[in-house]
Amino acid sequence: MAIEQADSVVVFDNSRDKESPVVVAKKFNRGALEIIDSPLTPDWAFERLQKEYHARLASLAELAAALQGEGHKDAPPVNLAQAANGLKYSGRMVAVTALHLLQEAEQRQFLVHARALTQDRSYRAGSVEQVSYAYERGKIVPLDRGRNR
């Protein structure tokens, strides 16, 4: 997920003993992720990086199609939601995929949420929902954490 949001990425494989790390993937200037097709590129680079990256791109394309399907002739501004501890966003869910949420927030502002960063719960397209971000020591705080106190 960090790969899709980063402007530039270089991924190294340092798993070979007594050998220098090898570049297995790269992305520059917000371009596409490129897996280096070389005999030294381990299988995990194709299985994990490429497959997951393409799944995320497909998910984002599904959100874009849902937005167009609502009759938005001009592309409204769509931004990645800032996923900082304590932030909450309320608004109508335009589309929900396994990996992302597309939410219409205030003043026709559309936000994309990466579900891996949100609290684990179900969301439903068409309903007004709140997406919140709560972290503790780098981990997502479970929704029921505060209810048992």
Image (cartoon, grey):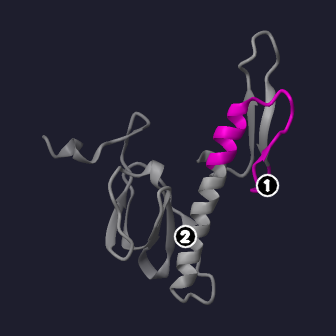
Of the pair 39 and 9, the residue shown nearer to us: 39
Q: What residue is pinned by disc 1?
A: 29
Q: The C terminus is located in which quarter?
A: top left
Q: Tag 1: Cα neighbours inside 10 Å, few (<14), some, or many (≥20)?
A: few
Specify the segment rendered in magenta.
28-52
Q: In this view, does 137 lie to the left or right of 26?
A: left
The CA span between labels 1 and 2 is 23 Å
Q: Is residue 82 left or right of residue 130?
A: right
Give the percent coordinates (x, y) of residue 31.
Answer: 77, 56
Of the pair 52 and 100, the residue shown nearer to us: 52
N-term mark: 1 or 2: 1
Element under label 1?
A: loop
Amino acid type, label 2: Leu
* Image position of 121 with respect to 77: above or below: above
Quarter of the image where one finds residue 105: bottom left
- Identify the residue at image location x=23%, y=42%: 145
Give the percent coordinates (x, y) of residue 34.
Answer: 79, 47
Comparing labels 1 and 2, the label whose residue is closer to the camera:
2
Amino acid type, label 1: Asn
Q: Are marks 1 and 2 in contact (CB under 8 Å)?
A: no
In the orientation shown, which residue stands out farthest toward the top? Answer: 18
Residue 125: assigned label: none
Element under label 2?
A: helix
- Identify the residue at image location x=27%, y=48%: 143
Q: Is residue 149 left or right of residue 142?
A: left
* Image position of 86 with respect to 80: above or below: above
Of the pair 45 and 108, the residue shown nearer to us: 45
Q: What residue is pinned by disc 2?
A: 63
